Amino acid sequence: MSADAILPHMPDPKAALDASSERFVQITIPVGMLQCNCSIIGDLATGEALVIDPGDEVSRILELLGRHKLTVKAIVSTHAHIDHVGGLYKLRQYTGAPVMMHRDDVPLYQGMDVQAAFLGVPTPETGEIDQLLTDGDLLQWGSMAAQVMHTPGHSPGSISLYLPQDTGKITSAAPPQLFAGDTLFAGSIGRTDLWGGSMEKILDSLRSKLLQLPDETVVHPGHGPRTSIGEERQSNPFLVNK
Ligand SMILES: [Zn+2]
Ligand SMILES: [Zn+2]
């Protein structure tokens, strides 16, 4: 297992000295059997954090939150596949933070036993969903904000979270960030052969939403390494000439 990848909000090492990088922390760790990327985005000034896709290894996530003295304001699920939601219930129990997902993936969440049987693993405990997300919702914590984009195709309720440069109460020097769940990967896109998947819809989500973002947008996929919109626009075989 690799060491925790603790990435400053700004990838440029010079920028690490910038005041705003002292204000933010962004941590992505692969968790669980399928190595789902769980992300923590924290405002160090207020100690408020958003956790995206706590798929498993909740004790490790809690340890990282404690290390940076962060309080979870919201737990966001990019979609309700088992590898992304396995730790939702536990993290909510420990932190009291609200769990949020798109309405169209609630049936998948409620059918966790079907997903567990499909993978041949025990069914993780599931609980309440506190807030249903809709395209265009703005999530705010500390001085940060992220925009919810409904990007169906990998699953009916798949969302991506976009943090533009000038969102929230401050303008960040960092490039915009996209947390894409399993909609977009470095060099690939999400599979569409699972419950409610649609190749037509995922291509439409990519074309009409994600490819509309600026090239410099850093993409954090649900699995595997980071990439950028520009890189994928140029070289992703599913996206070139689309
Ligand atoms: Zn998935
Ligand atoms: Zn996944």
Image: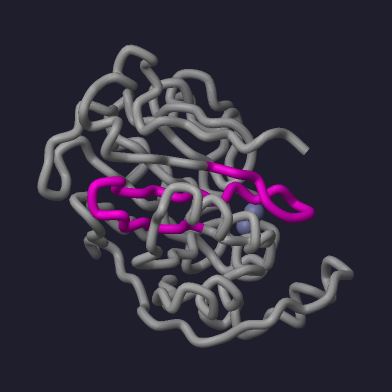
Could you tell whether 135 is left or right of 240 in the image? left
Report the front residue among 96 and 154. Answer: 96
Could you tell whether 159 is left or right of 176 in the image? right
- Residue 14 falls in which quadrant of the image? top left
Report the front residue among 128 and 14. Answer: 14
Q: How is the image coloured?
A: one colour
At 79% from the left and 54% from the top, the residue drawn is 33
At 54% from the left and 59% from the top, the residue drawn is 53
**Image coords of residue 140 (percent x, y):** 23, 60
Vertical placement of residue 175 versus 59, above or below: above
- Residue 58 falls in which quadrant of the image? bottom right
Report the front residue among 30 and 242. Answer: 30
Q: Quadrant of the C terminus?
A: top left
Could you tell whether 74 is left or right of 142 in the image? right
**Image coords of residue 36 (percent x, y):** 65, 51
Q: How many marks do you count on the picture?
A: 0
Q: Main secondary structure of the magenta part?
A: strand
Q: Is residue 54 magenta?
A: no
Q: Quadrant of the N terminus?
A: top right
**Image coords of residue 144 (percent x, y):** 23, 50
Could you tell whether 175 is left or right of 92 in the image? left
At 73% from the left and 55% from the top, the residue drawn is 32
Give the extent of the magenta segment: 28-52
At 41% from the left and 74% from the top, the residue drawn is 97
Ligand 2, image quadrant it occupies:
bottom right
- Residue 57 falls in which quadrant of the image? bottom right
Q: Is residue 48 magenta?
A: yes
**Image coords of residue 219 (percent x, y):** 44, 35
